Amino acid sequence: MHEQRERAPQRRYEEYAYVLDLEVKGRSRTVRGKEGVIIQSLGEDYLTFLELQGIEGVVYTIGERLYIGRDQRDKVVSVLGRLSYQDLTPTARSVLPEVVEKIVASKEQRLIEFFNTSQPLNPRMHALELVPGIGKVMLRKILEERERAPFTSYADLERRVGLKDPQKQIARRILEELEGNTQTYLFVRRA
């Protein structure tokens, strides 16, 4: 008899977000009439801009990682909604590169897997070529090396193919996607 396995549904929401900016007596951009501690943040897994409602009297720091999942939250009342890059305050925009670099560092295994498994987008363009620093020659090196053995870290990738500071190159690509300066999205989930 054939048993059908049930797969757990894939989580489609952020568990953690990083504080980009906050207003202690702010007004929500996503929920009409909502006021209080309003936090602009960047989600860790899907890289979505989120507006959060914080708790009055709690101390927050720019760049802090907050739990925003469905279980008991200690510093966030609720996730109010998604924001666009244009909705971000000047402070949030200025902190964004640093936060993206933090996320890229913390998600090394997932992002290295991109180098091990990415495919061509069309007959003329490979997904890897959209990462700054990767042209046709570097692409060929990466594809040859990953055939020999999968990459295990940023250092391994840099050592084996000569891509300078892959962590920074990925962060640059993610920033382009977050700012909306691209037609193809590799890392950021679009609205």
Image: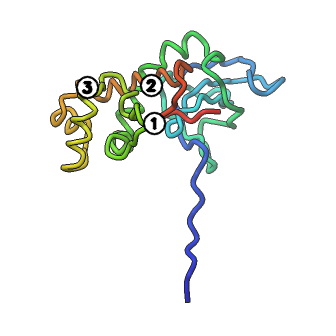
Q: Residue 87 vs residue 139: left or right?
A: right
Residue drawn at x 67%, y 30% as measured from the top left: 82
The answer to whether 69 is drawn above or below residue 134 in the figure is below
Q: Position of residue 124 (x, y in %)?
A: 40, 31
Residue under circle 1? 122
Residue annotated with mark 2: 99
Sequence-wise, which precedes: disc 1 or disc 3?
Answer: 1
Q: Is residue 169 above or below residue 120?
A: above
| SS category of the residue bearing label 3 | loop
- Tell me where residue 109 appears, x and y as whole percent: 34, 44
Kind of residue at badge 3:
Asp
Which amino acid type is marked by label 2?
A: Val
Q: In front: 122, or 1?
A: 122
Quarter of the image with the N terminus is bottom right
Identify residue for label 3. 165
Residue that lies at the very extreme toward the bottom in this rendered image: 1
Residue drawn where x is 60% and y is 19% of the image: 85
Q: Amino acid at mark 1?
A: Asn
**Are the residues flagged by discs 1 and 2 in contact, CB closer than 8 Å?**
no
Q: Alpha-carbon distance for marks 1 and 2? A: 32 Å
Quadrant of the image occupied by residue 119: top left
Q: Position of residue 74 (x, y in %)?
A: 59, 41
**Residue 8: which quarter of the image?**
bottom right
Which disc is residue 43 wearing?
A: none
